[in-house]
Image: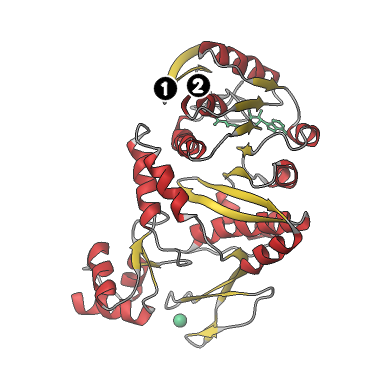
Amino acid sequence: MQKIITEGSTLLKIYEKSFENVSKKTASVFFNPVMKLNRDITVAVVRSLEDVRFLDLLAATGVKGLRVAREARAEEVALNDINSEAVKLIKENAELNTLDVEVYNSEANLLLNEIKDRFNFIDIDPFGTPVPFIDNAIRRVSNKGVVGITATDTAPLCGVYPKVTIRRYLAMSLRGELCKETGLRILLGYIARTAAKYDRAISPLLCHSTGHYFRCFLKVVRGAKKADISIKNLGYLYFCTKCRNFEVEKSMFPVKRECCSREMSIAGPLWLGKLKEQDFVEIALRNSHDLSSEAKKLLEIIVQEEEIPFYYDIHSLGSIMNIGNLPKIDYIIEQAKKKGYHATRTHILPTAIKTDLPEKEISDILRSYR
Ligand SMILES: C[S@@+](CC[C@H](N)C(=O)[O-])C[C@H]1O[C@@H](n2cnc3c(N)ncnc32)[C@H](O)[C@@H]1O
Ligand SMILES: [Zn+2]
């Protein structure tokens, strides 16, 4: 059974129960309504770029590519899926919205090998890990083009299955309150290393960690020297599981570090460079005016977010200090700023702050509030 829904201003024919109650792998054509936010942000991002030639590589119902064609007015949009049922639905959905798009029914990597430099935006939205598609997307996107990558394998990236993270990303993950940003930076570190193999550099325009997935929009620039500079952003996170203190350092190899008379946990290699281009995110926020309030809120918080790697989770600090009555996040931010430090909220964890204020001084703020 099929039904017609509207997402953004795009009409969409989908199979009923294409997500709910049906395993994603057995649904005839996959559609997850929760990913609307992911698609809203993509529309805002494409609106903020010029002359976009967009390839929706793993399109399913076609919702993302069709929304980009209709709501972001990309110059050219092509959609692809290996599933012939999906391809049929994509064509019907294009017609429903009177959109002139190209539709392919190929295996993603085969298609990428055929398209040469045609697209300056390649979107990868797989079931689980994007790893099988990253090499070819990086090689095939045109110079200074953008790759949009979704990863829903958050369990391995966030330390639940460390062996999977090592096999898939050749990186050590971490559990605890820093796991989300660690997972996002492991993914980016992996993409930076993959790009470097092909003499390409990545430069993040906008990255977010939302619910069960990570999403990043990265500019890919060709040039061996640029690739050398890009991978200088790789390094490691050192984390003390006792006092929750952490340190980061850009380096090729990790070293042993101690805190509270014990060895600190190590995560990485990670991307320790920027997670956004500030001007770009501000433009994307302006271009989200007619999108969901959720999308606007996410972009608003990212716009104000400091580019300081990692954060202090106030609940974790309160718990190890045995403080029940914790001040509000905004109060702590205000106190940190009064002391002359940078401090902001982070979209990654609502109970955390990004700040260059030393952990000891944050603990003092919590203690004096008690
Ligand atoms: C998570 S869905 C895409 C969801 C879609 N972008 C959206 O926003 O609703 C992944 C899609 O990739 C397709 N797919 C999986 N492996 C593929 C491959 N190797 N080549 C092409 N398509 C593939 C599946 O058929 C499925 O429709
Ligand atoms: Zn410690």
Q: Which residue does the numbered mark 1 point to in the structure image?
A: 9
Q: Gap between marks 1 and 2, in whole Å?
A: 22 Å
Asked if labels 2 and 1 touch by Cβ distance under 8 angstroms, the answer is: no
Q: Tell which of 228 and 248 is nearer to you.
A: 228
> Quick check: which quadrant has ligand 1?
top right
Please determine whether, in this image, residue 330 is positioned above or below residue 261: above
Sequence order check, earlier mark of 1 and 2:
1
Residue flagged by tag 1: what amino acid is it?
Answer: Ser
The location of residue 224, given as percent across then percent down, is 76, 60
Task: Indicate left or right for 346 with 108 as reference.
Answer: left
Secondary structure under badge 2? loop
Residue at image location 22% in from the left, 66% down from the top: 331
Mark 2 burial class by Cα count in 10 Å: few <14, some 14-19, many 20+? some
Q: Tell which of 314 and 296 is nearer to you.
A: 296
| Residue 329 figure quarter | bottom left
Q: Tell which of 357 and 231 is nearer to you.
A: 231
Q: Residue 63, labelled with which disc?
A: none
Q: Is residue 160 visible?
A: no
Residue at image location 27% in from the left, 78% down from the top: 339
| Residue 40 figure quarter | top left
Residue flagged by tag 2: what amino acid is it?
Answer: Lys
Secondary structure under badge 1? loop
Task: Indicate left or right for 148 with 259 as reference.
Answer: right
| Residue 171 figure quarter | bottom right
Task: Indicate left or right for 26 with 228 as reference.
Answer: left
The location of residue 335, given as percent across then percent down, is 24, 73
Residue at image location 56% in from the left, 66% down from the top: 272
Q: Which residue does the numbered mark 2 point to in the structure image?
A: 17
Mark 1 burial class by Cα count in 10 Å: few <14, some 14-19, many 20+? few
> Between tags 1 and 2, which lies in front?
1
Residue at image location 29% in from the left, 73% down from the top: 336
